[in-house]
Amino acid sequence: MQSQSKTLAGIVTTPLAKAFLARAALLPEVATRALHRRKDKSRYYEEATWQALPAEEKALTEPFPADEEAYYYTRYGSPPCVFKRDRALLPTGTPARIEIPG
């Protein structure tokens, strides 16, 4: 996420966007957590909760190691890339699609 923030820092011009991107360097590292999720991705369980499930419910789940990428990026993409979608925070004339390395 930090490399994406550095790339976008040269593109955005508003104080809000610059402040948001500068804070990426301050984000803490997040340890991987062992979670389980339903195979249809509709529900996630911490280990203790998963252990308490009936066998038939457990059979509908799969392991899901929630690492730092899963924590910060979620299923919606990286937070810095919100500026790709939010045209109000980009300078006039910026292309609708900005390629971000990484």
Image (spheres, rainbow, N blue to C red):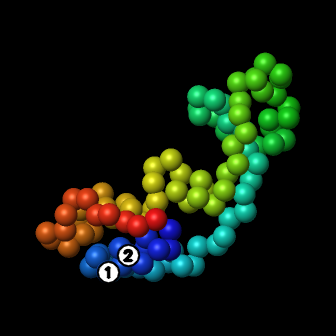
Kindly check if marks 1 and 2 are in contact, taking CB atoms under 8 A apart as contact: yes
Local packing at callout 1 (Cα closer than 10 Å; few below 14, some 14-19, many 20+) is: few
Considering depth in this image, is 101 or 92 the residue closer to the camera? 101
Give the left or right position of residue 62, taking residue 19 as reference.
right
Q: CA distance from mark 1 to mark 2?
A: 6 Å
Q: Which mark is residue 7?
A: 2
Q: What's the mark number on residue 10?
A: 1
Q: Is residue 26 above or below residue 56?
A: below
Rendered residue at 28%/76% (across/down):
11
Q: Position of residue 83 (x, y in %)?
A: 33, 64
Of helix, strand and loop, which one carries label 2?
helix
Q: In the rendering, at what x and y percent does residue 4 appear? A: 43, 70
Q: Is residue 86 visible?
A: no
Q: Give the residue at x 39% y 62%.
A: 81
Residue that appears at 46% across and 65% down: 102
Residue 52: tell me if it is visible.
yes
What is the three-letter code of the residue carrying label 1? Gly
Q: Quadrant of residue 96?
A: bottom left
Q: Determine whether, in the image, residue 20 is placed left or right of residue 48.
A: left
Based on the displayed image, in which of its 4 quarters is residue 82 positioned?
bottom left
